[in-house]
Amino acid sequence: MIIVGGVYREECIRPHWSRIFGSAGRAAVALSGLSPDSRLVAYACAGWAEDVRQTMRGLGMTADLQEITHDIAFHYLHPLSVPELVGTPDIPFPSLSASGDVVLRFGMVEGDATISAERAIYDPQHPAAALLFHANGSTAKELAVVLNEAELEYGACSSDPWNYKTIRDRFGADIVVVKRGPLGAVVMQPSGNIKIPAYRSETVFKLGSGDIFSAVFAHLWGERKWPAAEAADFASRAVARYVSTRGTQVSLDGLEDLAPFADGETASRIYIAAPFFTLPQRWLVEEMRGCLAILGGDVFSPIHDVGAFGGPDYIANKDLEGLRSCGTVLAVIDGEDAGTLFEVGYARNLGIPVVALAEVPRQESLTMLEGTGCTITNDFTTAVYRAIWSSLR
């Protein structure tokens, strides 16, 4: 297989992460055990291009790199945050090119790639690039486009973005696979749309999970010629293993043993139980609410949906009324805010599941949470995902 796309530095503050990967680099490492002798085609900063070559050589891969002076990096506060992109050129570099039986092409920030393939898999990496596979002269006898929901909706320009014929005509693709984060994926094909579940993982390291999905799908559909739905299902399983281990090299062994989360949509609201009295506290609530909404969550946030004015009786009654309407509570435990702890206890008394984010707790403060079956994590992304999964029916 040929993998074409970006190789970039990735920096994340919490949890700490500092690697040279990018979509194509990660996909190449992921496929090194599944598709030996594959070739990576990419731009790479001259300062670390030789490191990439040596790494690929050690994995049995070939790296065909066009060296550039720009050290392009994505900086994340956390894996669900909007990254800061640094080091991009003012003018795109001359286009790369590749030709082969199976080509996985990712969208890039510093240039483009023209490919020719028997089977091509295209992951645009940006809504504005979603329709551009053929625009630069790229060709494929069979084309699968792997999108996220934002790319699908942007490219569809339709009130019914889940209509296969509409999407096929818009994207010029035989198969369209839509990644839906905690909700799994959907394979759109002539015989009808097929839902693919997300698979269970105790923790969620989100950076690069979509790259793993596209790489595994490309190998199974493109090289092994598995049916698209089966290939997407194993890609979803591979993602579950990656986000829980951060292990980039993919093996199919044992993936069939993974269990899916509930095969449903977000059926109940998620209540955010958290203090919001200081700027850092309010920032965290805003971040939590925004991330839940982007991932498909229906959120009730007391500060947004009730407010901070009206007196204790009004606020307490309205907050608890909102809590009773929800199917899951996502609570911030650090600081041991009295109102938050009250809401957690109230929810557990009603049998409502609670996911607790506790980054720096006192161990004794977790006793009642652990004893009443709350899910406790010290990772923001994991807390958000677990809350979404808990709300599925």
Image (cartoon, rainbow, N blue to C red):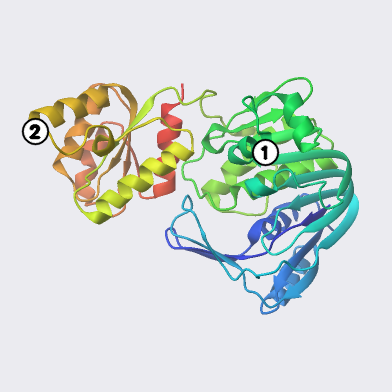
Indicate the secondary structure of the residue bearing disc 2. Answer: helix
Instruction: Please tell me how crowded label 1 is: few (under 14), some (14-19), or many (20+) other residues with Cα within 10 Å.
Output: many
What residue did someone put label 2 on?
312
Q: Position of residue 79 (x, y in %)?
A: 48, 53
Q: Residue at x 35, y 50 (%)?
A: 378
Indicate the secondary structure of the residue bearing disc 1. Answer: helix
What residue did someone put label 1 on?
155
What amino acid type is highlighted by mark number 2? Pro
Residue 254 visible to the viewer: no
Residue 170 visible to the viewer: yes
Which sits in the foreground, 174 or 260?
174
Q: Residue at x 54, y 47 (%)?
A: 243
CA distance separating discs 1 and 2: 48 Å
Q: Nearer the viewer, mark 1 or mark 2?
A: 1
Say if 10 sits above or below 260 in the image.
below
Which sits in the foreground, 353 or 324?
324
